[in-house]
Amino acid sequence: MVFSLTSILTNIGTLCRKHAWKTFGFFALLAALSCAYTVTHLGITTETDRLFSDSLPWKQKISEVEHLFPGEKGTLVAVIRGKTPEEAQDAAKQLADKLSQDTVHFSSVSLPNANPYYLDRALLFLDETQLQSLLDSLVSSQAFLGTLAADPSARGLFGSFTLMGKGIEAGEDIPADFNKPLNGLAEALTQNAKGDYTPLSWQKLLLSDLDALAAGPEFVLTHPKRDFNSLQPSQASTTAMRTAFNDLKLAKDGRVNLLITGEAKINDEEFATVADGMTISLVLSIVLVSLWLFLAVKSPRIVFPVLITLIFGLILTTGFASISVGTLNLISVAFAVLFVGIAVDFAIQYSVRFRSQKDMNAGEAIDQTSKECGIQILVAALATAAGFLAFTFTSFVGVAQLGIIAGVGMLIAFICTIALLPALLIIFKAHPDKAETGFAFMHPVDHKIRKYRAIVLGIFGILALLGIGLLYFLKFDSDPLHTKNPNTEGMQVLHILEENPFTTPYNAQLLVSNFKEAASKAKQFSQLAKDPNSTIHDVLWLGAIVPEHQKEKLDIIEDSSDLILPTLDAINNPEPAPNAEELRKAAKKAAEELNSVKDKLSEPLLKLQAAMNVLSEAPDDVLIKTNNALTYYLTPQLTKLLRILQPKETTIADIPKDLRREYVSPDGRYLLIIHPKGHMSDSSVLRRFVDQVKSVDPNIAGPALEITESANTIVKAFITAAFAAIVMIFIILFINLRRLLDVCLVLAPLILSALLTVIIDVSIPEPLNYANVIALPLLLGVGVSFNIYFVMNWRAGLSDPLSSPTARAVLFSALTTGCAFGSLALSAHPGTASMGRLLLFSLAATLICTLVFIPALLPNHKAEPLIKE
């Protein structure tokens, strides 16, 4: 069988080199057709959902929740910060209004922080201690608030300073609670007096203790219309959002800034980084591969045929990808670099063996080369393909797709090597090299390794045991966010948001059938959250947005509002706006009154007195600008204060439909969102959080579950794939080698190289992740190829492997493959870079085993030749 297959491969080489131009024309036609089909049919998707099979139970749970509650799925989020909270709120509202009108780029726009339901009940969401503290502060400021409500201008504000001076003169004390607002006023007036007319934040002064209204970023939540045929499906929407924001006056004045994040934005950045990295890596790998090729074969007449063979193989493989999968994903897009890195090995093996033929013309050399190494390259191609195709049996669709493309790509590479390369060698008039093509200086090393084989094997045995021991310390980082570029805008914002349990992307979700069950589960989660060692912060559901202990709180509010509300009612009939002269008089009067009790003034009032002195002498334009800056947000905040001081008792029935829809599905099921506590970017902490949530109900969903379960799926996929690959490789080897000993001679170095990779990986360390774990099947493919060449040469009677042309081919093949993989390590994308590093580690381990372990492992006697002349 082997002999007849050898004849077939030899005849193919002979036929192709005799009809060189026809062969080239045939492959050129195939490449042209492949290009044409690829241009019109190959797509790229950034949808991470498509990386895993829809049949997975955890995927189905997540998909069900996402279908019922679209929420933050596929969102583009504007995160707006302002010099003051009010400016951020204004900018968010203005931006939301603009985006709502842009139906070309956005399907929905909302302001999650601006729901009237929360504003009207803001005081009821405080605990009783916080509530009492805030109300006490407002009561102590009653006279101040009354003056401002009656005259919401700088004139009224200066008038309140005058009243303070009179009060101090009469022996009254300024309440301690009033010091914080006074400090804020003093700072603002000092800046105004210096010509800095920053709008004063009355929200900070009056409601700083009210968490629901406190300063912080504002969010505009949108669902962009995405084009998944684009490398960045949401790019047009992102640009539209940024343009709309830049048109805002607050943005032009530098009062607010915009950062954009959300799943859509992060996915866009992810794919852009990966695509850029892959393009650079592909170009760099081709350049470096060309360099090592020239050093390996030392003849442009051979280098160019090899490169053309490589390019044609890549084009045909891309065409196959267009036919077989149609759409590349975030992982399968790596096939091009991997193809270049691995397929070049076949061409190098063939061309180095071609150069080594002595006393032959080009045609005879090609025939002999095909006869000598055709079977070896075929077995290597089949074994490498098996390493990739093993992933087709897994639920990790992203890598399964890559496995199909790269696996068939290896067979395409073999066909190009055995058929196209001989034709190109003839076209380029290549010829064998009369000089020695092996490493003659390695003859003594061959003998030394055989002489001290027991010691060499003993050292590798110790390393194997060490590798087995270190398997326990091999870490798998299950968080896909760690493989993304942390320097992109979306990720930088996300890292800020993840510090807050309410905005972190690591929450868990639970879908239950009715209100009673939701209340029961929420109670259990709340009990767990009380444990100091718990990773659960709280649970948010429909019942949680109805304030607790309302009767007690309403009583507290009523006691205070009876005093404050009549004072604030004056805002409905305020004094007319002042002119500059009225402002000057009010400032002068306040300055004189405060100056009369200067020795009794606190630090904030001393600053106010100094500012009043300056403003009392200021020109008209300064006074008008000061008035505008001080009172721009005063009336809205006093109106808001008047509103929140009049809450009513709330029940589930009072929750508006739009808010209710966030927690209740159309079919009546209830959603619970469990927020985490702790450093969730630590995989062990995240798993503990998921386990604690599952202790209440195992049927959870959400991002936290997706991260942990996707990691479990990946690990299972690679265990399954590794087992399948080894079984397929064993079968391929046994069919071709036909002796169990010879199969073991190929597989033993393969297993050892895997253990050496573990040692390197743990020592660096380089945690495994869902991006770099692809190195494992490549280790099987590349490793088995090198081993096959040496073992099959040994079977053919070769006794000094390191000085042979095969050793030269293996070394330069490893260097070219290393450059291809090493180019990935230079990527700006952390996942791609980690994949490149791990590929280099595994390649280094493979090379050590091939060039040191195998020569020591091979028996000293010469095996019976595989090919009989």
Image (cartoon, rainbow, N blue to C red):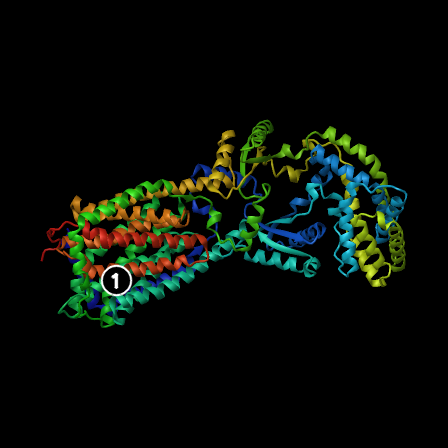
Instruction: Note whether 267 is above or below 526 in the view shown.
Output: below
Rendered image quadrant of residue 35: bottom left
The number of discs equals 1
Residue at x 52%, y 39% (from the top left corner): 702
Q: Is residue 693 left or right of residue 391?
A: right
Amino acid type indicated by mark 1: Ile
Camera-side residue of 527 and 280: 527
Q: Is residue 614 left or right of residue 773?
A: right
Residue at x 36%, y 66% (from the top left corner): 287
Instruction: Note whether 191 is above or below 683 in the view shown.
Output: below
Farthest residue to the bottom: give it.
Answer: 429
Image location (x, y in percent) of residue 264: 54, 51
Q: Is residue 127 left or right of residue 45?
A: right
Farthest residue to the front: give it.
Answer: 599
Image location (x, y in percent) of residue 741: 17, 45
Image location (x, y in percent) of residue 107: 60, 50
Mark 1 secondary-structure assignment: helix
Q: Pointer 1: what residue?
A: 348
Where the C terminus falls, by quadrant?
bottom left
Is residue 326 visible from the viewing direction of this image? no
Instruction: Note whether 417 is above or below 404 in the view shown.
Output: below
Residue at x 72%, y 50% (from the top left corner): 86
Q: Is residue 466 left or right of residue 432?
A: right
Image location (x, y in percent) of residue 785: 25, 53
Camera-side residue of 820 and 202: 202
Rendered image quadrant of residue 213: top right
Camera-side residue of 107 and 87: 87
Camera-side residue of 511 and 696: 696
Category of crowding for the residue at label 1, using alpha-carbon neighbours closer than 10 angstroms: few (below 14), some (14–19), many (at least 20): many
Is residue 4 visible from the viewing direction of this image? yes
